[in-house]
Image (cartoon, helix red, strand yellow):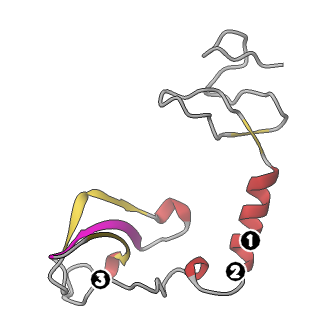
Amino acid sequence: MTGDGAFIDGNRTCSLHSQGGHDLLAATVIGADATYLAIVDADRLGDGTPLRDPHCRAVAHEQLGPLPADTARRIALAQRAYRCGCPTESGRPCQVVVSRPGDACEWHGPTEGTNGHAKP
């Protein structure tokens, strides 16, 4: 339960630690009149203060104006990276970074025929 009368659905909440949000959670919050996604400071859970911050003040890349330098750098690097592209179990292309276009990642194998992808 949160201080604003809403509660967090633990089945639809995950830690943002691996994305650089060390004490933050991406949480599905169920309120009296709406269900919404919130970025929650894990240290504030259970202290009775409202969790909803529509301005996401704790998240620098959600603010108006230019992106923080670190965020802009990560986006630029991601755009230049080559991706494996082999179909995953979900049917979507694999997003693992590889060194050359057309290469398969370690999960999709270095040999022809592994998951239908041939490595050049």
Determine which of the numbered discs, if any, sits on residue 72 in the image: 1
Vertical order, 24 against 66 (above or below): above
Provide the residue designation for mark 2.
Answer: 68
At which x and y percent is residue 5?
A: 14, 82
Provide the residue designation for mark 3.
Answer: 51
Query: Are circles 1 and 2 on residues that touch, CB within 8 Å?
Result: yes
Vertical order, 4 against 89 (above or below): below
At which x and y percent is residue 86?
A: 65, 27
- Residue at x 77%, y 68% (from the top left corner): 73
Crowding at dot 1, Cα within 10 Å, few <14 / some 14-19 / many 20+, comes out as few
Quadrant, the C terminus: top right
Residue 92 falls within the magenta-colored stretch: no
- Residue at x 29%, y 83% (from the top left corner): 51
Quadrant, the N terminus: bottom left
Image-based side of 112 in relation to 57, left or right: right
* Amino acid on which the number 2 mark rests in the picture: Pro
Crowding at dot 3, Cα within 10 Å, few <14 / some 14-19 / many 20+, comes out as many
Occupied quadrant, residue 50: bottom left
Q: From the image, give the main secondary structure of the stretch colored magenta.
A: strand
Crowding at dot 2, Cα within 10 Å, few <14 / some 14-19 / many 20+, comes out as few
C-alpha span from label 2 to label 3: 24 Å
At which x and y percent is residue 10?
A: 23, 60
* Amino acid on which the number 1 mark rests in the picture: Ala
In terms of sequence position, does the residue under pointer 1 or pointer 3 come before the other?
3
Q: Which residues are magenta?
A: 24-32
* Amino acid on which the number 3 mark rests in the picture: Leu
